Image: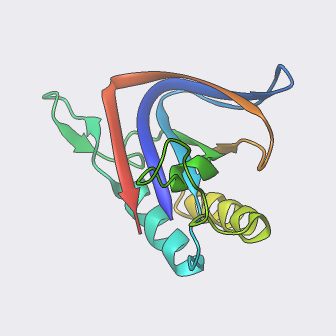
Amino acid sequence: MRVLIQRVTEASVAVNNTVIGEIGPGLMLLVCAMQGDGEAEADKLAAKIAKLRIFRDEEGRMNRSLLDVKGSALVVSQFTLAADTSRGNRPGFSTAAPPDEGERLYEYFARALMEQGIPVATGRFGADMAVSLVNDGPVTIWMES
């Protein structure tokens, strides 16, 4: 799995101009299941992200986790994270999990994050979504299983 993590002060996702998920301070997580991924990868990433120390402490250092700051996560499916741009000018996406498996793992990842004690809002798999966020820092981190 691939996850693009952004520390945010707020984030939302809309479908057809209707907000379907929103959070205050926390993490915006763009998630892509890759071919060969399974629940073990989703569990590992969810546990790591919940404990990832990327929030400021009293001294301004990145030393607190999402759990420590009692933040939320907005989890949005993003199959384009599988883009292969090594040849030509048109990205290929053949390394992404097939849609049925991608959706199952996306939903599983969101539940696994909830099981870590994180409040989670989500987008809609396969929908044309408009994502809005205020990146805090900015802090943006790429993570793969």
When asked about the image quadrant of residue 33, the answer is bottom right
Where in the figure is residue 30, as x and y percent of width and height?
55, 45
* Snapshot quadrant of residue 47: bottom left
Measuring from the top left, give residue 95's x and y in whole percent. Answer: 56, 67
Q: Is residue 106 above or below residue 4?
A: below
Up-down: is 123 above or below 60?
below
Which residue lies at the image location 54% right of the left edge and 69% below the top edge? 42
Q: Is residue 115 visible?
A: yes
Residue 14 image position (x, y, % from top left):
76, 27
Residue drawn at 40 percent across, 62 percent down: 144
Q: What residue is at 65 percent from the left and 68 percent from the top?
A: 97
Q: Is 36 on the left-hand or right-hand side of 143?
A: right
What is the quadrant of the C terminus in the image?
Answer: bottom left
Pick the residue in front: 63 or 33.
Answer: 33
The quarter of the picture where residue 37 lies is: bottom right
- For this orientation, the residue located farthest to the front is 88
Q: Nearer the viewer, residue 57 or 132?
A: 132
Color theme of the render: rainbow
Give the x, y percent position of residue 58: 19, 29
Residue 100 higher or lower than 80, as above or below: below
Nearer-the-camera pick, 61 or 127:
127
Give me the residue at 76% from left, 63% from top.
99
In this rendered view, identify the residue nearer to me: 2 or 39: 2
Label total for image: 0
Q: Answer yes or no: is residue 118 visible.
A: no
Side of 97 where 34 appears, left or right: left
- Left or right: where 104 falls relative to 46: right
- Judged left or right of residue 123, residue 32 is left
